[in-house]
Image (cartoon, helix red, strand yellow):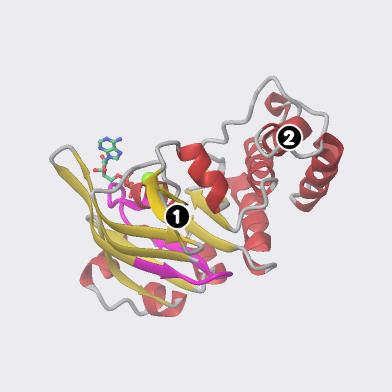
Amino acid sequence: MIDIRGVDKWYGSHQVLRGVDLQVRQGETVCVIGPSGSGKSTLLRTINHLEDINAGSIEVGGELVGYREHRGRLHELRESEACRQRLGIGMVFQQFNLFPHMTVLDNVAFAPIKVKKQDARAAREYGRELLARVGLADKASAYPSKLSGGQQQRVAIARAMAMRPQVMLFDEPTSALDPELVGEVLAVIKDLATTGGITVVVVTHEMGFAREVSDRVIFMDDGRIVEQGTPEDVLVTPRHERTQAFLAAVL
Ligand code: ADP
Ligand code: MG
């Protein structure tokens, strides 16, 4: 579902991704861990075409990210939103970024109606289903400012799911939350990751979560994938010195 080959990314003279190779199967759940500044967010953002890359290639669902085929030829796709649309990628960030002037249900149904031109009634009905799935059926008419951070992040997840993505990317989805609200958000992500064929990539510092839900854990350092394997391999018996040092510092 995701096929990343030899990806380099530079910001000016600073190289932040160094020959990254990563393949993620459909339905797989991958957690990405590693120190701050190691390139985790940049990697997620390139998958979603929020950033261009300087070398290598990224395919999602068999299509080159950032390109569109027209009459047998590839044309560079400048509009990121169009690219994400086509590829069916949803993304959830540390900050929830809900539309403050819209109700919870309108936040969830907005993009399917405006961007996908879905029938408004059907979009709102599906929106209610998703709100029920994230445990917020009773908040459909509330405004975001009335919700806790954990509830807002669950709305953000429902909003991303409303576009029926094949791939969901989460960038430290619980890092902005008070500790007592982390569990409810992780439970929702776990539910998505373990049901249906959706492919999930989560950048997280929650090692217990990574151990519990991942099919595979990726450890990044200094723009490289240093080590990857099952949660046991990477989190319990890491082979690389850098992984060991990182885990010793966070656990
Ligand atoms: P992580 O998510 O692992 O903390 P990032 O991918 O955010 O790491 O950042 C990797 C490196 O790229 C860091 O050194 C960071 O300062 C740098 N960086 C990230 N975004 C930008 C940007 N827009 N412009 C310049 N440098 C950036
Ligand atoms: Mg980051």
Magenta extent: 22-40
Compare residues 167 and 200 and report the one nearer the observer. 167
Assign a secondary structure to mark 2. helix
| Residue 14 drawn above or below residue 23 | above
Amino acid on which disc 2 is placed: Ile
| Residue 232 drawn above or below residue 121 | below
Compare residues 248 and 204 and report the one nearer the observer. 204
**What residue did someone put label 2 on?**
113
Query: Is residue 34 magenta-colored?
Result: yes
Query: Is residue 249 magenta-colored?
Result: no
Quadrant of ligand 1 in image: top left
Q: CA distance from mark 1 to mark 2?
A: 29 Å
Amino acid on which disc 1 is placed: Val
Identify which residue is drawn at 24% across, 74% down: 240
| Residue 154 drawn above or below residue 197 | above
Residue 13 figure quarter? top left
| Residue 60 drawn above or below residue 129 | below
Residue 78: image x %, image y %? Answer: 40, 37
Query: Ligand 2 within 8 A of label 1's CB?
Result: yes
Identify which residue is drawn at 58% across, 69% down: 27
**What residue did someone put label 1 on?**
203
Identify which residue is drawn at 45% across, 74% down: 231
Query: Ligand 2 within 8 A of label 2's CB?
Result: no
Compare residues 29 and 5 and report the one nearer the observer. 5
Q: Residue 213: which disc?
A: none
* Mark in the foreground, 1 or 2: 2
168 displayed left or right of 59: right
Q: Earlier in the sequence, mark 1 or mark 2?
A: 2
- Rendered-image quadrant of the C terminus: bottom left
Residue 137: image x %, image y %? Answer: 84, 43
Residue 93: image x %, image y %? Answer: 51, 42
Residue 162: image x %, image y %? Answer: 70, 46
